[in-house]
Image (tube, rainbow, N blue to C red):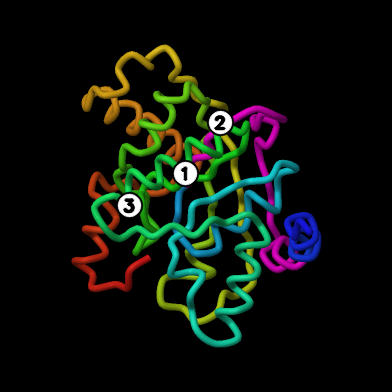
Amino acid sequence: MDAYPVVRALARPLVLGMFRTRVEGIEHLPADGPVILAGNHPSTLDQFFPPLLTRRRVTFLAKSEYFTRPGLLGHVMRLLLEGIGMVPLDRGGATAAEAALRRGREVLADGGLLGIYPEGTRSPDGRLHRGKTGVARLALATGVPVVPVAVIGSHALYPTGARLPRPGRVVVRFGAPLDFSGQAASAEDGAVLRSVTDRVMAELQRLSGAEYVDRYAADVKAELGGRAA
């Protein structure tokens, strides 16, 4: 049995009600066909909103640690993540990045909606950080449009280190699709990959209004001594 529609139907009123969610620009999301959904990541909450707000199934590549937390809360989290289409991904090892790209290409080849966080990890401070080029590699290799989506307000409600989220207002804002298909021939050009990634991050900054930091979130997190995202 496919648990996705059941979990989505049960979780939608709870999550959207608790966070009084307002969605803007969802008309920018194509009704069908492969799409890369590129989001900011200020909180663990972020990954729940696109699957619950869109009519389409969203596949997010989530770190495997989210699926292995101990205790009852960990068990509930795992069932919820699996139920809304999250796919565990081991980010350790030299081949982890290529494994993520390969899995992403599979989702897109099937005409799916792939969710990705260009920052590569959760923001340690709520700001928007320098994007990694995986989103550009996927976009240029597949010719698939990139739809930026910004979640606003989630960091204040569930910051890094908090045990439980608190109720409040969250805004989810979708931007117009970005088409990079004309640059497919430059899919291995480092300068082009960086330019495409920066364009995606600029759109996320515009949509979210967050302060942009031209440093990788993982480096900032290491300096702050925060937990891994």
Other residues around mark 1 within 10 Å, as few (<14) / some (14–19) / many (≥20): some
Q: Are marks 3 and 1 in contact (CB under 8 Å)?
A: no
**Residue 7's x, y, as percent?**
75, 63
Magenta highlight on residue 114 = no
From the viewer's perspective, is residue 145 above or below residue 21?
A: above
**Residue 22's x, y, as percent?**
69, 51
Magenta highlight on residue 21 = yes
Tag 3 residue: 96
Tag 2 residue: 109
Other residues around mark 2 within 10 Å, as few (<14) / some (14–19) / many (≥20): few
* Relative to 119, 158 lies left or right: right
Which one is nearer the viewer's eye here, 78 or 177? Answer: 78
* Tally of numbered tags: 3
Tag 1 residue: 103
* Relative to 124, 86 lies left or right: right
For badge 2, the amino acid type reads: Ala
Tell me the SS state at disc 3. helix
* Alpha carbons under labels 2 and 1: distance apart: 10 Å
**Residue 122's x, y, as percent?**
40, 59
- Residue ID at (73%, 56%): 4
Disc nearer the start of the sequence (2/1): 1
For badge 1, the amino acid type reads: Arg
Q: Are marks 2 and 3 in contact (CB under 8 Å)?
A: no
Q: Quadrant of residue 27?
A: top right
- Residue ID at (70%, 68%): 18
From the viewer's perspective, is residue 210 above or below residue 63?
A: above
Tell me the SS state at disc 1. helix
The image quadrant where one finds the N terminus is bottom right
